Image (spheres, rainbow, N blue to C red):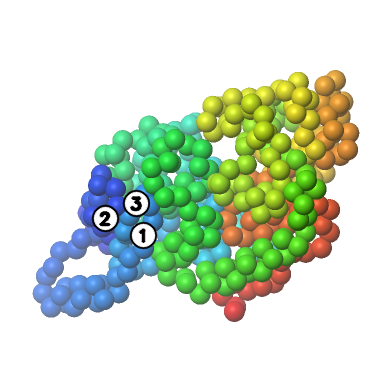
Amino acid sequence: MSDDSHTRRNVLKSTAGLAALGAVAGCTESGGSDAASDSTESESSAYTASMEPVGEVTFQSVPETWVANNGSWADMGIALGQDPPEGVWLPRRYHTQYYDEIPDVEVSTEEMTQLSQSGKVDKELFLELDADVHVIDPNFLLNRFDWSQDDVDQIENQVGPFFGNSIFSTGYTWHEDYQYYSLLEAFEKLSQVFQEPERYEEFAAIHEEFQSSVAEVVPEDESERPAVAIMWAAGNEPEEFSPYLIGEGTSFKQWRDLGVRDALAETDVQDFHETRGRIDYETLLEIDPQYLMFRGHEAKTREEFEDTIVSFMEDHDVASDLTAVTEGNVYRGGPLYQGPITNLVVTERAASQVYGVDEELFDRQRVSDAVNGNF
């Protein structure tokens, strides 16, 4: 990267936040009255946004290019009317087919750079992408990948700041020492970065109305709510599963909002995030949940899912005895990552799965208008 590309950088990382993440980027040389005038204009247009664990970040102008940790943040950017991110960890887990539900909203992942390759995240990709802001929790890089604090500092100094929080799960031990944000709280933080408060407010209103609609379909008596087991199922003929206990992360938001009972929570089964453990059909048969929700199959249609994993379980010696299998209650369990748009879609789908809801619970056109600024 050339020195010229350093000086044109339009964002500054302040010294607030994590002490080790405090280097300042984007300084320019002064020279003559024009430079002084430019400096004055820059100072007058500067603004800040803050989020733990990175602290306060100062921006000289609205970022034009960005990369995102995952589909949660990518979806937030789309909701805020931004161009898609230049890269995400795994584009295949950013399920843009959910946008098919929304008129005039279409996103392709074909041109997105995959940041995680063969289990590693190459620092050179960040230098090549040269993004104005990295909507990523740096702790995720430091704790899940082979990154050092010097690597994080280099990207902040030479490219652009980090701004993010690992909101999708609270199961990581390194995530316990700083503030956790709900989906809407994180969304509001990102709206400050992109200077889109009106779009955020419109989505907040949509979300509030949606929550009222969802509440109407949830039985008041908790005993009438179904017991659901959420697991990751790899492949079309799985024999073992990664169990996910319903937690506070955004990836479980639809299940919390629908008030379902966690079939795994009252057992000895440990959450996959904490133990990396697995369970088999014999263990599942002992628990015998009313509903089985399998992650890892969001790219499939309902028909494709039934023709593969459901069909396999129906023919399996042990799985075929499960209540969820015999009663036809085996479904795709939703994505790991969801933002304000995708949450509407997957929550409505989940309401159909567990409560038999067959009407629309949110206004598709209003969501489209919010994304496209027609409100």
Q: Nearer the viewer, residue 313 or 177?
A: 177
Residue 116, position as x, y percentages in the image? 48, 38
Does the rendering let one see residue 125?
A: yes
Circle 3: residue type: Val
Name which of mark 2 and mark 3 comes first in the sequence. 2
Left/right placement of residue 151 relative to residue 344 reads left
Judging by the rendered image, the residue that carries numbered circle 2 is 16
Name which of mark 2 and mark 1 comes first in the sequence. 2
- Dots 1, 3 in contact, CB < 8 A: yes
Q: In the picture shown, does residue 242 fall above or below 151? A: above
Q: What is the number of the mark on residue 54? A: 3
Give the quadrant of residue 219.
Answer: bottom right
Q: In the picture shown, does residue 95 fall above or below 327? A: below
Q: Which of 200 and 257 is in front in this view?
A: 257
Judging by the rendered image, the residue that carries numbered circle 1 is 50
Between marks 2 and 3, how big is the CA–CA gap?
8 Å
Residue 111, position as x, y percentages in the image? 54, 51
Give the quadrant of residue 105.
Answer: bottom right
Q: In the picture shown, does residue 135 fall above or below 374? A: above
Circle 2: residue type: Ala
Mark 1 lies on a secondary structure that is strand
